[in-house]
Image (cartoon, rainbow, N blue to C red):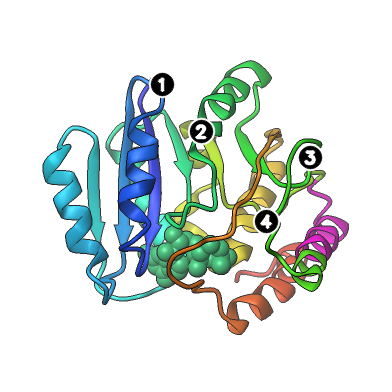
Amino acid sequence: MKVTVVVPTYDERDNLPVAVERLTSLPVSDLHILVVDDNSPDGTGELADKLAAELPDVVGVLHRTEKDGLGRAYIAGITRALDEGAEIVIQMDADLSHPAEVIPAMLDKLETSGAGVVLGSRYVPGGSTAEEWKWYRKALSAWANFYVNLILRLGVKDATAGFKAWQADTLRAIDVASIRSNGYSFQVEMNYRTIKKGITIAEVPIRFEERTKGASKMSLKVQLESAAMPWKLLLGRQV
Ligand SMILES: Nc1nc2c(ncn2[C@@H]2O[C@H](COP(=O)(O)OP(=O)(O)O)[C@@H](O)[C@H]2O)c(=O)[nH]1
Ligand SMILES: [Mg+2]
């Protein structure tokens, strides 16, 4: 079973080698990594090329010319992964927030549950958000999940999760390339399209870790977009 982990990067020089190391040491036989770099000023793209040269059968790099948001990077990466024959595609951040060691459990769940996607979830029993998060950040994340679920009735505990394992067929069914939202709402829109197709979403618990190196790229603009998105989706607007 060909598994491709798509890892979007923007200025993740200190984190990417560790993320790749964690992924390559997993007990998953046909695992590939596709780094999608938006011409990071800190040289992450060149570093990714070096990793690809060291592990040519495992690591691939997709270079894009400018920073264009997480959603756009994922669309490009997922499209490439499917074209290259991936049967399962995993979305994972480069900043070490997502615990790579949970991937075998996610793959297991994908196989046994019959779900089209498995979320690495902070809000199912056994999961947790970063200990470092201040109460208001925890409250904002919990509120965002409650809000999104209330409007869209996704029936998942972690609607904004960014660590996900997809069946290739599900990605084709939801036509990822036509998604317009970026940032967190890209994750929500993927879930919404999945549910709309009658495909099930499963969750496994993760401990989300705060990044220790580099800075978050999520802006106020991205957060505002996320607040409006559920309504646009519900009203069926082209967004
Ligand atoms: N290629 C690309 N990657 C991005 C972009 N924005 C964020 N990322 C990456 O997406 C992942 C999650 O972003 P991050 O800033 O950690 O978001 P946060 O965890 O919500 O604060 C990280 O691996 C980032 O490097 C972008 O515009 N382009
Ligand atoms: Mg992060």
Q: Residue at x 31, y 34 (%)?
A: 32
First in residue order: circle 3 vs circle 2: 2
Residue 124 badge: 3
Q: Picture quarter containing residue 53?
A: top left
Residue situated furthest top in the rendering: 112
Q: Which residues are magenta?
A: 141-154
Mark 4 sits near ligand 2, with its Cβ under 8 Å away = no
Predominant SS of the magenta segment = helix
As drawn, is 21 to the left or to the right of 202?
left
**Marks 3, 2: nearer the viewer:** 2
Residue pointed to by mark 1: 27
Is any part of residue 72 visible from this angle?
no
Q: Residue placed at 48% from the left, 46% from the top? A: 91
- What residue appears at the point 60 percent right and 56 percent down from the top-left corner? 187
Mark 1: which secondary structure?
A: loop
Image x and y of residue 126, in percent: 76, 36
Q: Quadrant of the N terminus?
A: top left
Taking the magenta stretch, the answer to whether it contains residue 172 is no
N-terminal label among 4 and 2: 2
Identity of the amino acid at label 4? Ala
Q: Nearer the viewer, residue 188 or 133?
A: 133
Residue tagged 2: 101
Question: Residue 79 or 121: which is nearer the viewer?
Answer: 121
Q: Is residue 126 left or right of residue 58?
A: right
Q: Residue beneath label 4, please? A: 130
Residue 153 falls inside the magenta stretch: yes
* Residue 21 at x, y percent in the picture: 33, 40
Residue 238 picture location, percent across and down? 61, 69
